[in-house]
Image: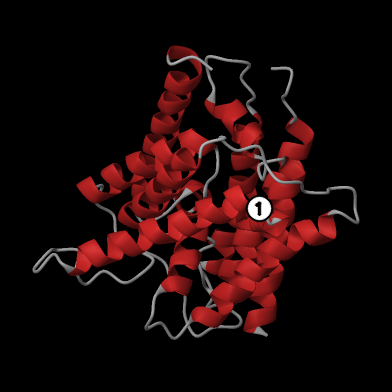
C-alpha cells in the first residue's frame, strides 16, 4: 500500500461530497456526471444550460490547478485506440442503461440510501476489479 | 444565479478529483488492482464524499432547492436487469482504461487526443443506448426520463 494517500483522499473526497450537497441544496439536482453529460447530448432538452455550466466548472478546475501546484498533465492511457474506443462505448452505454456512474450511484445514490445505487456500485466495482485482475495478472502486463 | 451555482459546483467537484488524485486513471486502477500493489485511496475518497453529501441530502430533503422550483431525484426502488447489466458494462469499460465520466471530462482540459477520443466514444455509447431504447416499441422503460438515477 505504498501508494496510499489517505489525507489527500479525505480532503478531495469531502470536496466532491460538498459539490454534490450544494448542487442538491441550490439546484435540486443530482451530481451524477454521466447523467449531466448525457442530458447535454439530448436534442430536445430545455435544461441544458446548468449542465453545461457544471461541466464547464469541472474542466476549469485543472486550469486553475496549475497555479496552485496541482498541474494536470495528459493521463497515461492504453497505447491502442481500439481499447480506448471500446472502453468509452462501454462506459457510455453502460451508464445510460444502468442509470448512473461512480458519482451518481456511488456518491449521490448511496448518500440517500437508494438500494439501486448500492447494487449498481457493487456491480461496477466488482466487474472493474475483475477486468483489471484479468488484464494485469492473467493476460500479462 | 443557477448557472453560477452549477459552475461553482462543477469547479469544486473538479478540485475534489484533482486533490484526491482520482482525476488520474493510474491512481484509480491502483484501487481496482486488488491483486497488485493495492491502493485503497478511492475507498477513502468515497467515504469522505458520502459523509458530506449525506449530510447535505438530509438538509435538502426538508426544504425546496434555493435556486430551482423542485428537486429532481429518482423514486425508483427496484433492482432490475437494466441496472445490473448496465453497471456491469460500465465496470468493464472503467476497468479497461481507469476513466469514469467525471475524470474523463475533467481530463479534456489536457487536450490529450486519447481523452478526447474516449469522451467522444462515451457520447457515442450513450447515443447508441438512446437509439436502441427508442426502437423498443412497448418496453417498460420507454417513458423513463433522461437521467434516471444520476
Quadrant, the N terminus of chain A = top right
Name the foreground residue: B47 vs B16: B16
User: What residue do we see at 65% from left, 37% from top?
Assistant: A76
Q: In this view, does A96 lie to the left or right of A105?
A: left
- The x and y percentages for residue B133 are 21, 64
Subunit that carries the residue with mark 1: B
User: What residue do we see at 42% from left, 48% from top?
Assistant: A91
- The x and y percentages for residue A41 are 44, 72
> On the image, which quarter does residue A99 sit in?
bottom left
Q: Is residue B44 left or right of residue A38?
A: right
Q: How many marks?
A: 1
- The x and y percentages for residue A115 are 35, 46
Residue B122 visible to the viewer: yes
Q: Is residue A43 left or right of residue A31?
A: left
Name the foreground residue: B63 vs A115: A115
Q: Is residue B66 left or right of residue A46?
A: right
On screen, residue A12 above or below B33:
below
- The x and y percentages for residue B102 are 58, 54
Q: Mark 1 points at which residue?
A: B107
On screen, residue B28 above or below A26:
above
**Mark 1 Cα within 10 Å, few/some/many (few <14, many 20+)?**
many
Name the foreground residue: A104 vs A129: A129
Helix or strand or loop: what does disc 1 sit on?
helix
Quadrant, the C terminus of chain A = top right
Amino acid at each position: 500500500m505504498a501508494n496510499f494517500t489517505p489525507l489527500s483522499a479525505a480532503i478531495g473526497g469531502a470536496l466532491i461530497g460538498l459539490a454534490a450537497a450544494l448542487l442538491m441544496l441550490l439546484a435540486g439536482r443530482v451530481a451524477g456526471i454521466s447523467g449531466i453529460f448525457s442530458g447535454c447530448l439530448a436534442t430536445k432538452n430545455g435544461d441544458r444550460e446548468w449542465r453545461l455550466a457544471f461541466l464547464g466548472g469541472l474542466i476549469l478546475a485543472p486550469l486553475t490547478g496549475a497555479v496552485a501546484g496541482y498541474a494536470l498533465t495528459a493521463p497515461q492511457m492504453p497505447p491502442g485506440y481500439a481499447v480506448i474506443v471500446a472502453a468509452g462505448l462501454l462506459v457510455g452505454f453502460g451508464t445510460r442503461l444502468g442509470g448512473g456512474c461512480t458519482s451518481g450511484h456511488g456518491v449521490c445514490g448511496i448518500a440517500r440510501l437508494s438500494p439501486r445505487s448500492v447494487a449498481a456500485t457493487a456491480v461496477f466495482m466488482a466487474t472493474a476489479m475483475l477486468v483489471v485482475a484479468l488484464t494485469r495478472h492473467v493476460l500479462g502486463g | 444565479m443557477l448557472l453560477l451555482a452549477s459552475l461553482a459546483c462543477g469547479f469544486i467537484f473538479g478540485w475534489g478529483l484533482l486533490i484526491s488524485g482520482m482525476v488520474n486513471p493510474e491512481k484509480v486502477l491502483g484501487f481496482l488492482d486488488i491483486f497488485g500493489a493495492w491502493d485503497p485511496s478511492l475507498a477513502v475518497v468515497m467515504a469522505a464524499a458520502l459523509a458530506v453529501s449525506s449530510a447535505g441530502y438530509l438538509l435538502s430533503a426538508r426544504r425546496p432547492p434555493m435556486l430551482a422550483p423542485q428537486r429532481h431525484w429518482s423514486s425508483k426502488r427496484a433492482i432490475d436487469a437494466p441496472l445490473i447489466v448496465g453497471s456491469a458494462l460500465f465496470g468493464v469499460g472503467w476497468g479497461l482504461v481507469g476513466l469514469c465520466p467525471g475524470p474523463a471530462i475533467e481530463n479534456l482540459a489536457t487536450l490529450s487526443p486519447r481523452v478526447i477520443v474516449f469522451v467522444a466514444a462515451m457520447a457515442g455509447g450513450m447515443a447508441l443506448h438512446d437509439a436502441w431504447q427508442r426502437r423498443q416499441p412497448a418496453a417498460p422503460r420507454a417513458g423513463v426520463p433522461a437521467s434516471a438515477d444520476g
